């Protein structure tokens, strides 16, 4: 089965490289529904997988100066404590396998459906932050740090339970909070924040025993070349075609997860 995990890692990596999204949104449901991995283990393994694969992207963005480190710090002030509290709650509640499976799949399905909606209506969502005459709606600078930390709390809890949210949902939150930030800086800032968050949450899952290190290695062997190839193909494949296809796929998977036993 290891070669199947590696192939899956390659295909997901290819999609991530081409579209820039889809890592946790595709990998976790794939592990749960196709390979029969327990939801908690799929989430924990995918978190460490995401932290390792996004580290290179964060480094590249940092070298290019496309990371707003102050914003990363504010997000992390909310997300890392939220991840810790979520892990401690999971440990304290000591939910049995059936209940934990139900909790994770429920949150996972909601996160998938939200991600699909965001991808489908990305352009319309962007326009919500502007008036008819093109002026940008901005939160008062006095409230911006608190709103950013609160966003980090929500993203941190969601990512820790489902492994989804640090990518598309985090990007949309940044677009609303910082409408004047350039798109490349939004992406770079979101990726830079995702690295410590997924690593921290993943280590928490490792402590809980919900990480399969052999599975993690098999996925990385396939995903790293997949992302490399996909990033070179991205310029040749129209985003207006790929993103709706990915959104519809996530919508279908999300609906299936709702009824997944």
Image (tube, helix red, strand yellow):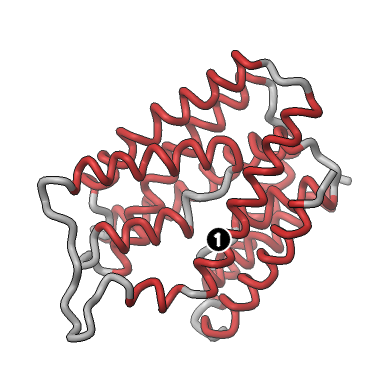
Q: Quadrant of residue 181?
A: bottom left
Label 1, secondary structure: give it.
helix
Q: Determine whether, in the image, residue 229 is placed left or right of residue 32.
A: left
In percent of width and height, residue 252 lies at: 73, 66
Q: Residues within 10 Å of mark 1 (few under 14, many from 20)?
A: many
Taking the spot 39% from the left edge, 36% from the top edge, the residue there is 79
Image point 43% across, 41% down: which residue? 154
Question: Going by the image, does 74 lie left or right of 158?
Answer: left
Decide which of 48, 230 is in the foreground and name it.
48
Residue 222 in the figure: left or right of residue 131? right
Determine which quarter of the picture holds residue 215: top right
Residue to which mark 1 is pinned: 115
User: Residue drawn 41% across and 53% down?
Assistant: 170
Image x and y of residue 152, in percent:
36, 41
> Quadrant location of the C terminus?
top right
Coordinates of residue 239 in the picture (x, y in percent): 52, 81
Which is nearer the eye, 99 or 122?
99
In the displayed structure, 66 sits above or below 87; it is below
Q: Tell me if 232 is positioned left or right of 249 in this view.
A: left
Q: Nearer the viewer, residue 164 or 231?
A: 164
């Amino acid at each position: 089965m290891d070669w199947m995990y590696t192939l899956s890692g390659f295909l997901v990596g290819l999609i991530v490289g081409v579209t820039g999204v889809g890592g946790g949104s595709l990998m976790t449901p794939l592990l749960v529904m196709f390979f029969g991995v327990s939801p908690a283990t799929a989430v924990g393994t995918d978190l460490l997988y995401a932290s390792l694969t996004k580290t290179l992207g964060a480094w590249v963005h940092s070298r290019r100066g496309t990371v707003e480190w102050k914003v990363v710090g504010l997000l992390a002030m909310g997300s890392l404590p939220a991840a810790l509290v979520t892990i401690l709650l999971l440990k304290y509640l000591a939910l049995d396998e059936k209940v934990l499976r139900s909790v994770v799949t429920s949150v996972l399905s909601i996160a998938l459906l939200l991600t699909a909606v965001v991808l489908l209506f990305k352009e319309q969502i962007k326009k919500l932050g502007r008036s008819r005459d093109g002026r940008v709606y901005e939160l008062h600078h006095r409230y911006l740090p608190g709103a950013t930390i609160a966003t980090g709390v929500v993203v941190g809890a969601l990512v820790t339970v489902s492994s989804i949210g640090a990518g598309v949902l985090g990007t949309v939150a940044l677009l609303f909070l910082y409408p004047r930030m350039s798109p490349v800086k939004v992406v770079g800032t979101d990726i830079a924040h995702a690295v410590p968050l997924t690593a921290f949450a993943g280590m928490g899952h490792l402590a809980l025993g919900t990480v399969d290190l052999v599975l993690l290695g098999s996925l990385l062997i396939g995903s790293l070349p997949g992302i490399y190839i996909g990033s070179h193909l991205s310029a040749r494949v129209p985003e207006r075609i790929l993103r709706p296809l990915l959104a519809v796929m996530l919508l279908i998977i999300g609906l299936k997860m709702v009824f997944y036993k």
